[in-house]
Image (spheres, grey):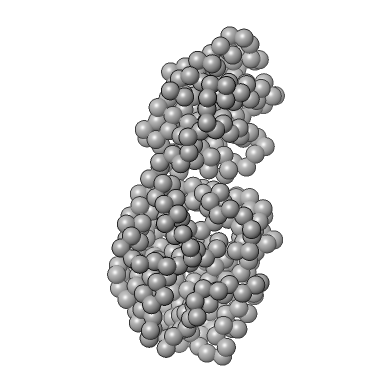
Amino acid sequence: MEKVEITDTIKFIGVNDKSIRLFESQYVVPNGMSYNSYLIEDEKIVIMDTVDKRATDEWVKNLETALNGKNPDYLVISHLEPDHAYNIKLIADKYPNMKLVGNVTTFRMLPQFFNIEDLEGRKVIVKEGDEISLGKHTLQFFMAPMVHWPEVMVTYDKFDKVLFAADGFGKFGTIDTDEDWTCEARRYYFNIVGKYGAQVQALLKKAATLDIKIICPLHGPILTENLEYYIGKYNIWSSYTPEDDGVLVVYASIHGNTEKAAKKMAEILKENGAKKVVLSNLVTDDMAEAVEDAFRYDKVILAASSYNTEVFPPMEQFLSHLRGKNYQNRKIGLIENGSWAPSAAKCMKEFIDGMKNITLCNKIITIKSTMNEENIVEMKELAKEILT
């Protein structure tokens, strides 16, 4: 891969994976994924994390090239998820004098993945604020539990003012993908880290005390400019604050009649002055993108067919994702369809009742098989209510 410049003494040794199609076996990644790893060269040499098993061979080559015959002194373990930690044992065996740096939880969990020889003698256990001097560089460690695993920590290099942010500020896509950061970072954040907004807020408060010039995440590009923008986005996302004024009309239709109603609802919303209206088909569109848009906009209309006295499963799955990500602080309208015993609205409402600070519109529209003129009148009423 092309050379990625960070600083004179910090090298990128990660790998771009352009062949992967599903990250974590569930998220579509049309532009692949990067597994980021770094090498800090000083009197002491540090490897910052390893990579996924898919990238082992290329990563080892990158590491050996960067080391140029030298031996590393430390491996810092920011996060034990296998896409970053798969090669810990391999590299520990290869360099038996290398120390492993982690926190108490890191070393409690590590044996669940690997049996490393003389682990007790190789541990360097750090806690909040601890430092390790490499020479010119001093690494300081900050705990970030549940962002998004319990052992996660971030590392701040005082010399180059670099924050090694673990999964924070990561995104889908390889480093050399030419695309807007925000969209794929948002989709990454809400689907992977989104449940843990309070913990991300706590980490942001720690980061605010540091003079950060560069952010090195474990996925996606190294951030070197306009850091206030990226940190600002993370503050919005992790506080569950709507990012944009708009309406997501998300629908799950069996035979197409609920889809027609959803599209009519979108048309009426635009006619009534909605600043932005986004349609999402849960049967054919990317579920992760629908989740992203639900968090992006401040209003959502859910339209779904009834199914087996409940709700059509794609909508059930979508709402389960939202509930699992701590969805909150939004306004929601409901449209249900049922030919003889409509049940979708009741089922959707049960999900919504478990969410925080949700304003549910009073007007709930029930369609009997196909949309009629009375339903259209009701849609106009719902549009006015949700836009007020």
386 and 314: which is toward the camera: 386
Q: Residue at x 66, y 56 (%)?
A: 31
- Residue 352 vertical position relative to residue 180 in the rendered view, above or below: above
Residue at horizontal 45 percent and vertical 67 percent from the top? 214
Task: Tell which of 386 and 245 is nearer to you.
Answer: 245
297 or 60: nearer the viewer: 297
Position above or below: 152 against 347: below
How many numbered tags mark residues here?
Answer: 0
Which quadrant of the figure has residue 73?
bottom left
Q: Quadrant of the N terminus?
A: bottom right
The residue that appears at 43% across and 33% down in the rendered structure is 330
Residue 52 placed where, x, y %?
58, 66
Residue 174, image x, y percentages = 62, 61
Asked if one can make out residue 221 in the rendered structure from this viewpoint, the answer is yes
Which x, y percent locates residue 88? 51, 74
Residue 197 x/y as whole percent:
39, 48
